[in-house]
Image (tube, rainbow, N blue to C red):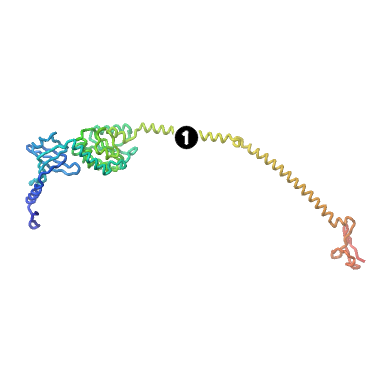
Amino acid sequence: MSLANSAEAPLPVRTVARSIAEWVGRLGRVWVEGQVTQLNRRPGTIFLTLRDPVADVSLSVTCSQAVVQSVVPPLAEGARVVILGQPAVHLLRGSLQLQALEIRPVGVGELLARIERLKGVLRAEGLFDPARKKPLPFLPRTVGLVTGRDSAAERDVLENARRRWPAVQFDVRHVAVQGHLAVEQCMAALKALDAEPEVDVIVLARGGGSVEDLLPFSDEALCRAVAACRTPVVSAIGHEPDTPLVDGVADVRCSTPTDAGKRVVPDYAEEVTRIGHLRDRARRVIGVLIQREVTRLDAARSRPVLADPHTLVSLRLTDVHALRDRARRCMTAALDRAGHDLDHTRARVVALSPQATLDRGYAVVQDAAGAVVRDPAEISAGDPLRIRVAAGELDATAR
């Protein structure tokens, strides 16, 4: 039932705090699972903080020395536990806390079973699908490295990568790689490196360890953070038998940090050798092409028309001379025939010419108008006449 109150009649803090405590107390005992992040041992009472492994939510827990001492193996920070407790509100501080009555560590078998269940969920969502994995760049400008400070994994990645490609650049982010802070710090480092435009690939590296040590790399929040990265992520967690869930979500899974150092950059010596082989192959191919063209050119030059170009001209010159002689003969024959025809025609013209008649002793009489007189009746006595003979003309008068 709500408490009667108003702006004119407000409730005291103690009343509200007491009411909240009463409502929380009605929850009864609850089983809570989480990860121990802080453990403060004081005489008679143990204070610890229980953190949700996925969400950034924590709960203050108090318990007696006897409850903590009954936990086997001994309770330590980073341990996954299940606590039976009674929720309560501390009236003096106004804070919510859990009074632990029993603490049970989560066993390895249970952890593995939960990891398998989470694996099924992530696989169903397609986070393990090979089609969504991004390829690694051939030669990254900068390699982002998320690993523990001064760890063997860091040395393995850096030394092997620089041995293969001495000019490789690294942006190293040191984080906790086990314990209750590992997930949060790894996610922050991934987000920061993913936002860097010069970082072309991110390596998440850690050395080997127990199932509990590698547990942060099977955390759901970290797996989803890796899947959300736009930059290709290489997972190099533990050794070959270790398979945390982040291996399946990452774009490339390497068996060890050493393997990751070899995968992210090419080998300088191998590339130089490959370039040399390609150059030799190109030289051989070009040599074959040049030799083929030289052979074709020699074959073309060996043809008679190119070996002695005058041969073709000489052959054509003979034909030209033959045609010229033939044309001359044909023209001469045609002119001779035309000359004979002209002579015959001239002879006929001469034979039919009036001059020929005059040459035979005949004469042509013409009147004053020049008309030929054929009949004496055409003229009168005293008319002037012109008589044309072979050698010339005579003037006469008719009688």
Q: Is residue 391 left or right of residue 25?
A: right
User: Between 214 and 361, which is closer to the camera in this rendering?
Assistant: 214
- Return the x and y of residue 197 as percentages of the image width and height: 30, 43
Which residue type does callout 1 highlight?
Answer: Ile
- Return the x and y of residue 60 as percentages of the image width and height: 12, 42
Is residue 185 visible in the rendered image? The answer is no
- Return the x and y of residue 152 as percentages of the image width and height: 24, 32
**Quarter of the image with the C terminus in it:** bottom right
- Return the x and y of residue 123 as percentages of the image width and height: 26, 42
**Tag 1 residue:** 286
Is residue 57 visible in the rendered image? The answer is yes
User: Between 324 and 29, which is closer to the camera in this rendering?
Assistant: 29
Residue 318, image quadrant:
top right
Q: How many marks?
A: 1
User: Between 328 and 367, which is closer to the camera in this rendering?
Assistant: 328
SS at mark 1 in the image: helix
